[in-house]
Image: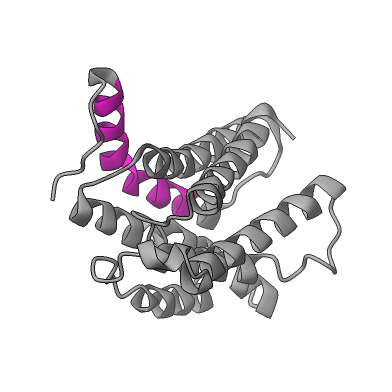
Amino acid sequence: MNIFRLAGDMTHLVSVLVLLLKIHTIKSCAGISLKTQELYAIVFATRYLDIFTNYISFYNTVMKLIFLGSSFSIVWYIRQHKLVRRSYDKDQDTFRHFFLVLPCLVLALIINERFTFKEVMWTFSLYLEAVAILPQLVLLQRTRNIDNLTGQYVFLLGAYRALYILNWIYRYFTEEHYVYWITWISGLVQTLLYADFFYYYFQSWKNHAKLQLPA
């Protein structure tokens, strides 16, 4: 494992911890899109179908369990917790997220590395993760009231994928036959979706101003 992969994993982990901290400590999910969290739960559930059948390392298994458990925990908190669910902005979080699921599934059935159930589901999870942040970005544009923890959560999610791109570049130049176009293109699309958010995030940081996205 290289430093870029480790940094990407740790950034992803911190993003989840930031969100759980916001929800568990403040008992609020204001500014958080349930639609995006449901998509992430689907992403991890379909990506880690091999969690108990394909052992790679203790580290790998633990990270899979953390992301699986945390994604479903967050969905449960927003949907069921009697205090947290009161702060959920259902009227603003109206992105029809399940319309993203079917196209990603169809694309995975057509374009994949190997036509097996696990491989198609893994490919589907890559396509879906690439666009899963869209409901969250739309919600932030609509509310325009972005607290620090929500802003940091979204920034860390984008940073994790950007670090993974550096990991792929590093591995391409240091490992033989390391070519995974589906993973690369999906990751690039995912990172590009954050470009606008990154710009306004750094502008707010530089000017010591509250983060706001244009409507």
Above or below for 201 versus 98: above
**Is residue 148 something that shows in the picture?**
yes
Above or below for 186 versus 198: below
x and y, in percent, of residue 118 in the image:
69, 74
* Left or right of 167, for residue 57: right
In the image, what residue occupies the spot 67% across and 34% down? Answer: 6
Q: Where does the N terminus fall, quadrant-wise?
A: top right
Which residues lie in the magenta part? 184-205
* Left or right of 169, for residue 91: left
In the image, what residue occupies the spot 48% across and 55% down? Answer: 27
Asked which quadrant contains residue 66, the reply is bottom right
x and y, in percent, of residue 112 in the image:
56, 69
**Is residue 113 something that shows in the picture?**
no
x and y, in percent, of residue 130 in the image:
44, 57
Q: Tell me which secondary structure the magenta stretch mostly adopts.
A: helix
Above or below for 193 versus 52: above
Q: What number of labels is visible?
A: 0
